[in-house]
Amino acid sequence: MQSKIEKLKSGMLADLKTAKSEQAIKDVEVKYFGKKGLFGDIMKSLKDLSVEEKQTVGKSANMAKKELEEAVMKRYDEIEHEKLSAIAEEEWIDVTVPGKKPQIGHRHLISRFIDDLEQIFAKMGFELAEGPEVETEEYNFDHLNIPETHPARDMQDTFWIKNLEKYVLRTHTSPVQVHYMQKNDPPIRVIAPGKTFRKDSDATHSPMFHQLEGLMVDTDVSMANLKAVMTHALQQIFEDSTIKTRFRVSYFPFVEPGMEVDCTCPICQGNGKLPDGVPCRLCKQCGWLEIAGAGMVHPHVLKNAGYDPEKYTGFAFGMGLERMVMIKYRINHMRLFFENDLRFIEQF
Ligand SMILES: [Zn+2]
């Protein structure tokens, strides 16, 4: 009888060893401890033994059972451990591997150029002014002495706001002049960089573009001041102290007299051709580039802003920033600024 118990015990231990899953262990348990299990057979056969034998054999049978139950629990633990090890192996993370660097952006070339302009003009005492991008017809046109019949007011040039009569996307930064003058007394020196909008789209025009407005008003402001400020600013912008300016008579309703400001071409230094004799394509060999519109602030505009034109004079200028950036950084197409192609943007 004892040997039967021993045999059963070693049999079950061997079976447990080969059980590779929880279900397999369960099957072993059923085989030995189940209702019709092998252990039950031994217990049943106890009844044929003497009382003394019953005690000894029963005792060792119980001990064997207890031992086997422990072996079963141990085997369950082992299987669980193997399972967790497999998961750990599969989902293993090497914390020492260097992380993926997040892509870090930077400010757009136009924004950085505006920062540069702010610094250049700040050194000449110009403060920063801002105005709304959605503007009233009054500020965008009327206060700037732009007559009712002026073609700039045409539906074809201006974005009018739907369902909001007499509102436009500002077509220039000049309305900021009026806003600023109405809120501040002379003397004033301000620049107003910002977005402007016109129905225009080709290689050199975009429906949204940037301008920089400049305004200086005081008791004795003259053309000489305008010329000094523009020349110095352009030399700083193009980082070239040999840059010269010239002023050509032109017409803008909000200045009198009005003029176009040209500067010598920063690529050929005004020669029309490069040092090796190659013709300069940027200035089309003329040596000059149109850079800004300017003039002395029209007395009507001063009056609309609440200033006495007998007492005060001022100059104003406006320049397209994309054009300046294109010249400075030798960029061919205006649309490159707004296509958000990283291959372009990351170059600057
Ligand atoms: Zn040139």
Image (cartoon, rainbow, N blue to C red):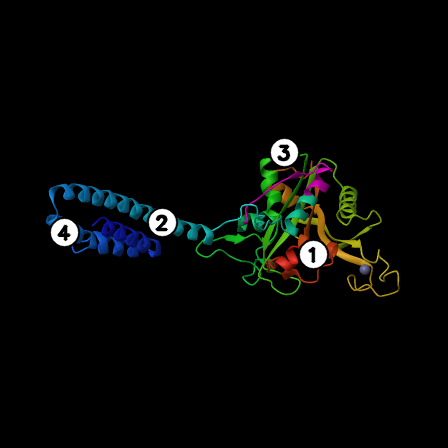
Task: Residue 323: give its label.
Answer: 1
What x and y, as percent, mark residue 166? 49, 53
Hey, what amino acid is under mark 2? Glu
Mark closest to the chain's N terminus, 1 or 4 = 4
Q: What's the residue at 76%, 54% (across, down)?
A: 249
Q: Could you tell me if residue 299 is visible in this image? A: yes
Q: Of residues 11 and 56, which is closer to you in this image?
A: 56
Viewer-closest of 90 and 137: 90
Label 3 to label 4: alpha-carbon separation: 117 Å
What amino acid is found at the position of numbered circle 4 in the picture? Ser
Q: Is residue 253 magenta?
A: no
Q: Give the residue at mark 2.
A: 80
Q: Position of residue 334 (x, y in %)?
A: 65, 60
Q: Which residue is tagged 4? A: 45
Q: Is mark 2 within 8 Å of ligand 1?
A: no
For this view, does 17 lie left or right of residue 60?
right
- The answer to whether the residues at label 4 and label 2 have Cβ atoms under 8 Å apart is no
Judge from the rendering whether residue 310 lies leftward or rightward of residue 198; answer left or right: right
Residue at numbered disc 3:
185
Residue lying farthest right?
Answer: 276
Say few, some or many: other residues with alpha carbon within 10 Å of mark 1 (under 14 / 14 to 19 / 20 or more).
many
Q: From the viewer's perspective, is the residue at label 3 or at label 2 nearer?
A: 2
Regarding residue 150, the answer to whether it shows in the image is: no
Which label's residue is closer to the chain start, 3 or 2? 2
**Structural distance between the alpha carbons of marks 3 and 1:** 33 Å
* Badge number at residue 163: none
